[in-house]
């Protein structure tokens, strides 16, 4: 149940206003640059992701497309950004930092790190951890509220990496249950899933492979895997991404996908590929939010029933 005690609201609002002022967001420019806060944030996000489209940037910054377009135009004219055409979609323009933009970002990061360090150096390790955890929790709660996700439904959810007893059967069960009701897959599909994930478990010792499960009060309620061997050529294959029916729309899928993509970045994979089926619109929106692009559609019957299969790729 939501917490009905609102005694913390005013102190949180007051602290938030003070943080905005102390961090310099009330000023015309930010972080010792000549740019407005939104432009600084844009450069930081593009720098972290290396490449973003205008639509993805608008989603990340929670800004209107018209505002994003004006900002991008100014940063292009200033020589901070450059546009390239996506190899996977000729209609998509990818935003990258120029050499000048990378130098500007380095200055921004140096300024911000020094600002935070000078504030927290006078605090104990416990106080520093409290600030870090509290800010992350509050930021996630704000995002969940904006997106309409249930913040309370994520309470008790933990993400664990690696094999857990019962994971092969549970992941197979979730796939069989979901795709049976949605598409009509039967025994053949369930057997294929069970065989595939059982084989994958024998390869988890390879550092390029990873499995993560979402635990809801100790019960396996979601899974995602990165198979770094299956496709070869330094390509990652995202597999067995599923969330229990009771937790769909609660942000658990986002958590799982986020940890898997972070793993792929650390492993320096050139691309991440995934196969899915036409009509799974919620999943597609989540993939596209992370930058995946649809590159292929074809009729397939490898799962025991004819469906339209889709391949998405993340550079």
Image (tube, rainbow, N blue to C red):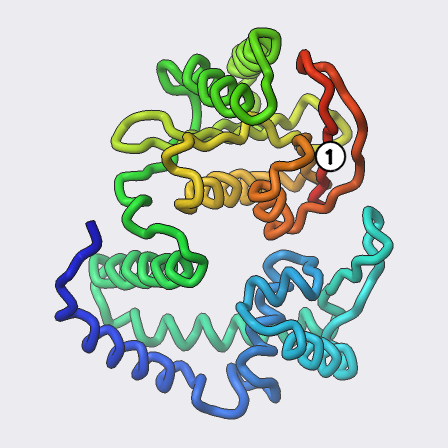
- The answer to which image quadrant residue 279 occupies is top right
Q: Please tell me whether residue 308 is drawn above or below residue 49 in the rendered image.
A: above
Pick whichever, 45 or 301, lies toward us.
301
Q: Nearer the viewer, residue 166 or 113?
A: 166
Residue 23: quarter of image: bottom left
Question: x, y (%) of residue 242?
Answer: 50, 30
| Whether residue 265 can be seen here | no
Vertically, is 60 above or below 190? below
Query: In the figure, 183 relative to 22: above or below?
Result: above
Give left or right: position of 129 versus 171: left
Q: Position of residue 156 (x, y in %)?
A: 26, 39
Residue, disc 1: 311
Q: Residue at x 37, y 19 (%)?
A: 164
Badge 1: residue crowd in 10 Å (few <14, some 14–19, many ≥20): some
Judging depth in this view, the residue of 255 and 278 nearest the camera is: 278
User: Residue farthest to the bottom?
Assistant: 28
Residue 288 lies, in percent from the top left, at 64, 49
Give the image quarter of residue 115. Answer: bottom left
Q: Is residue 149 left or right of residue 285?
A: left
Q: Which residue is located at x 58 percent, y 68 percent?
A: 44
* SS at badge 1: strand
Q: Is residue 12 left or right of residue 312?
A: left
Q: Does residue 151 show up?
A: yes
- How many discs mark residues in the rendered view? 1
Residue 123: % across, % down:
23, 68
């Amino acid at each position: 149940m939501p917490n009905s005690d609102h005694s913390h609201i005013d102190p949180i609002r007051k602290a938030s206003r003070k943080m905005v002022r102390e961090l310099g967001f009330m000023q015309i420019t930010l972080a010792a640059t000549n740019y407005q806060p939104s432009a600084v944030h844009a450069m930081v996000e593009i720098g972290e992701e290396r490449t973003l489209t205008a639509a993805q940037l608008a989603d990340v910054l929670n800004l209107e497309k018209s505002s994003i377009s004006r900002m991008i135009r100014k940063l292009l004219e200033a020589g901070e950004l450059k546009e390239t055409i996506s190899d996977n979609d000729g209609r998509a323009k990818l935003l990258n930092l120029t050499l000048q933009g990378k130098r500007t970002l380095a200055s921004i990061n140096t300024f911000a790190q020094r600002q935070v360090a000078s504030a927290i150096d006078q605090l104990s390790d416990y106080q520093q951890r409290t600030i870090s955890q509290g800010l992350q929790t509050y930021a996630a709660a704000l995002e969940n509220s904006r997106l309409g996700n249930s913040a309370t439904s994520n309470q008790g959810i933990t993400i664990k990496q690696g094999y857990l007893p019962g994971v092969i059967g549970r992941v197979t069960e979730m796939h069989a249950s979901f795709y049976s009701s949605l598409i009509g897959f039967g025994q053949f599909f369930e057997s294929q899933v069970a065989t595939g994930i059982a084989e994958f478990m024998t390869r988890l010792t390879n550092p390029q492979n990873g499995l993560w499960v979402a635990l809801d009060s100790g019960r396996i309620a979601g899974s995602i895997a990165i198979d770094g061997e299956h496709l070869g050529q330094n390509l990652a294959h995202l597999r067995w991404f599923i969330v229990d029916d009771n937790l769909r729309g609660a942000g658990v899928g986002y958590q799982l996908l986020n940890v898997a993509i972070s793993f792929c970045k650390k492993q320096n994979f050139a691309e991440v590929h995934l196969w899915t089926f036409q009509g799974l619109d919620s999943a597609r929106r989540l993939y596209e939010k992370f930058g995946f692009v649809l590159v292929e559609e074809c009729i397939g019957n490898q799962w025991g029933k004819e469906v339209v299969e889709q391949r998405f790729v993340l550079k």
